[in-house]
Image (tube, rainbow, N blue to C red):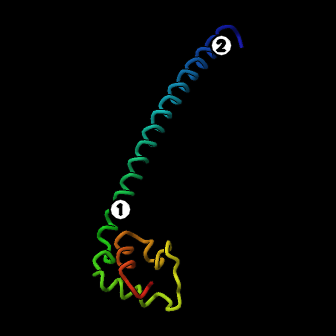
Amino acid sequence: PNAFESKMLRDVLLQAGSDLAQLDSEIDRVQAVREALCQKRQALLKFIAEHNAILAPIRRLPPELLTDIFARCSPPSMLWQEQEAPSPCAQVCAGWRKAAVSTQQLW
């Protein structure tokens, strides 16, 4: 290329480099926004799951029914050590633990 063509090509390459840097900067900004949105999404998913669990039908069972279910599901020959829970059901949540601990047939 002659001197004029070389200068034109350098100018075009300089502009392309500037455009590339601008695009890289924009990509970084968009990725940061995407990451923030993903975090908000995860927080909402967690919120929905936790609050749906509150409405689960199992939470409306009377304790008497739970204790009856636990007693029927527990093998009669199980011997529990003092530190152990009387049933795996007692490890599900505080309400189930309370029901299992109060079920004498499990001890």
Q: Mark 2 points at which residue?
A: 5
Vertical side of 72 occupied by 54: above or below: above
Q: Which of 56 and 107 is in front in this view?
A: 107
Which of the image's four quarters has the C terminus? Answer: bottom left
Picture coordinates of residue 27 (x, y %)? 50, 34
Give the amino acid at mark 1. Answer: Glu
Vertical side of 6 occupied by 60: above or below: below
Badge 1: residue crowd in 10 Å (few <14, some 14–19, many ≥20): few
Which of the image's four quarters has the N terminus? Answer: top right
Task: Identify the residue at image location x=43%, y=71%.
Answer: 92
What is the secondary structure assignment of the residue under circle 2? helix
Picture coordinates of residue 67 (x, y %)? 36, 84
- Numbered label attached to residue 75: none
User: Which numbered mark, 2 or 1, is in the foreground of this view?
Assistant: 1
Q: Nearer the viewer, residue 19 or 42?
A: 42
Task: Identify the residue at image location x=29%, y=70%.
Answer: 55
Count of numbered badges drawn on the protein:
2
Q: Mark 1 points at which residue?
A: 50
